[in-house]
Image: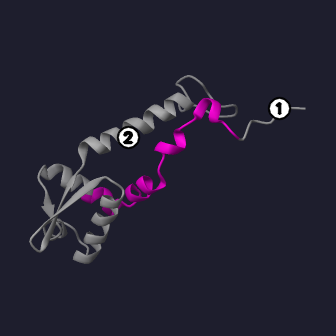
Amino acid sequence: MSKQPDSDNTSCCGGIEDVLEPGFFKALCDPNRIALLIRLAQCCDPCSVSQMARCCPTDLSVVSRHLAILRDAGILTAQKRGKEVFYSVRYSELVRTLRAMADAIETCCPPGREQPGSQRDE
């Protein structure tokens, strides 16, 4: 009889659930949001929704909704100036989040430790 794996891996993977936020992944799963994030990163300065919409083949309201999703996930920051909202990338927060995810995964599953039945890409 083989031993069943523990369903509770908190002994070796404790805390991973704290950094693998579904909202973060949901915000980044859409190609349009990735394109907006790239565009904002390339601009290096805050951009208004209307500026962002000029470079996208989608409606202004759709661009605004995509930017709000990225903001709600903590990836962007928004600042209202008069009637317009300007968005910018939260670089330090994005780096911190990605680094925390990488650290948690590496702690849980260190390099060189293969799961039974897994195949490595060669």
User: In the rendered image of this protein, does residue 83 appear above or below residue 5?
Assistant: below
| Disc 1 secondary structure class | loop
Numbered circle sitting on residue 101: none
Residue 83 relative to residue 95: left or right: left
Q: Are marks 2 and 1 in contact (CB under 8 Å)?
A: no
Quarter assignment of residue 68: bottom left
Which quadrant of the figure contains the N terminus? top right
CA distance separating discs 2 and 1? 34 Å
Query: Which residue is identified by label 2?
Result: 98
Give the residue at x 56% y 22%: 112
Where in the figure is residue 78, as x and y percent of width and height?
Answer: 21, 61
For this rendering, which residue is in front, 39 or 61? 61
Amino acid type of disc 2?
Leu
- Mark 1: few, some, or many residues within 10 Å (few <14, many ≥20)? few
What segment is highlighted magenta in the picture?
A: 8-36
Where in the figure is residue 13, as x and y percent of width and height?
Answer: 58, 34
Q: Is residue 19 magenta?
A: yes
Quarter assignment of residue 17: top right
Q: Is residue 69 magenta?
A: no
Where in the figure is residue 34, as x and y percent of width and height?
Answer: 31, 56
Query: Which residue is identified by label 1?
Result: 3
Q: Mostly what secondary structure, the magenta segment?
A: helix
